Amino acid sequence: MSRRRVILHVGTPKTGTSYVQDVLFNNRIKLRAEGLAYPAERFDGHFLAALDLMRLPWGGLEKEAVGAWDALAAEARRWPGTTVISHEILATASRSQVKRALESLGHPETEVHVVLSVRDLVRQIPAEWQENIKHRRTLSYQAFLDQLQDPERSGNIATWFWGVQEVPDILDRWASTLSPEQVHLVTVPPSGAPKTLLWERFATAFGLTGIDLDLHVERVNASLGVPETALIRRINKAVNAEVEPAHYRPLVRELLAHQTLSHRTGSPRLALPEPVWEWARDLSQSWVDEIKKRGYHVIGDLDDLLPTGEPPKFSNPDRPRERQVNKAAVEAIKALLQENVRMREHEEQLQQRLADTEQALERAYLRPTYRMREKAVRKLEDSGTGRRAMKLYRLARGRNSESA
């Protein structure tokens, strides 16, 4: 067996993937010293590669991504040890795209392992709707649930959700040419488990156990409660037509959702209504039964994919308590005011620096030496010989304009 190995983490979304990718990116120099490469010049390098592989449109980023997958695969082929590639949208790759990905990585000569991180549907479904809201969508929760349960799965919402969340189908596409020993499922622990447990499972899947890594990351994809998510949805309805995506992301998604509203931990959490909870439980059980038959390597416990106990109390985000939404709105307004103050103060500083620069230039123009140089230049420009001399002078100074 070749010493060259690729560990391909292909999803699913909302399973701690952003955290894992940030840890790998931040520690990539130390990992190389241990014989493991995470080839990326920027934190979203593997995301761009995934967009390129699947030719996915993504707000214009697909243009920036052209050639990214081939470049990443070439680095993996050059590295003599283990290479880790990770992005959750790879879960939706088609069979032909999977074939291209594996071949470009050198399979079967290169030993390729596929890692799929999975979480129970009872938590995944609300998390995916919330993620949709944080990406400018205005779809109601009920409409979202209806589309997911539609057997036809014909709408964009259902097509995307099941493309990145239906575990047996993802494994059909990614693992059909691999032995079960080369397919690894990392289960997300249930709520209340030790915070480090998920990372420990990923470390086992990637072969990082025993390596001392910095596990602190700045980027956190925090979750929102029911009234906070309802507020963002209302904001989307009000501003989508007027606020460009380039401004929406820092102001709404980052400032309001992640940095402000996610800190309101006392709000009711998103959950499933009881009939949907039971439907998701039964579907999850069928997935667990299928995975057991296939004999994949499971890191964690397949029971983590099954909800326990009774369905939690359901708080409907389509009809939230207005008092709770109002309190969240006040927090949002406060954050926007503070950000506006910061930007106004920064603007005032820039204006003062500009005024100081203009005054310095004006003083320079009034100096006798400047007037003498200006007079000499005008005199030289009056003759052909002088103009040629000034041209040579400007070229020597690296100037392209006609000013001295």
Image: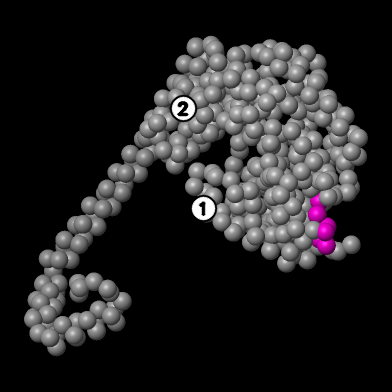
Pair 1/2: label in front: 1
Magenta extent: 108-113
Q: Which residue lies furthest to the bottom in this view?
A: 385
Residue 204 can be seen in this image:
no
Q: In screen coordinates, is 376 left or right of 180?
A: left
Relative to 96, is 273 above or below?
A: above
What amino acid is at disc 1? Answer: Lys
Reading the chain from its start, which is encountered first: label 1 or label 2? 1
Residue 371: x, y in percent? 11, 72
| Direction from residue 237 to residue 68 in the image, left or right | right
Whether residue 10 is visible here, answered yes or no, is yes
Of 404 and 150, nearer the camera is 150
Q: Which residue is drawn at 86% across and 32% down?
A: 290
- Foreground residue among 401 and 240: 240
Q: How far apart are marks 1 and 2 (CA)?
A: 26 Å
Amino acid type, callout 2: Asn
Residue located at (12% from left, 80% from top):
381
SS assignment at label 1:
helix
- Secondary structure category for the residue under label 2: helix
Residue identifier under label 2: 236
Q: Which of 199 and 4 is in front in this view?
A: 4
Residue 221 to residue 208: above or below: above
* Residue 80 is one of the magenta-drawn residues: no
* 75 on left or right of 383: right
- Which mark is on residue 63? 1
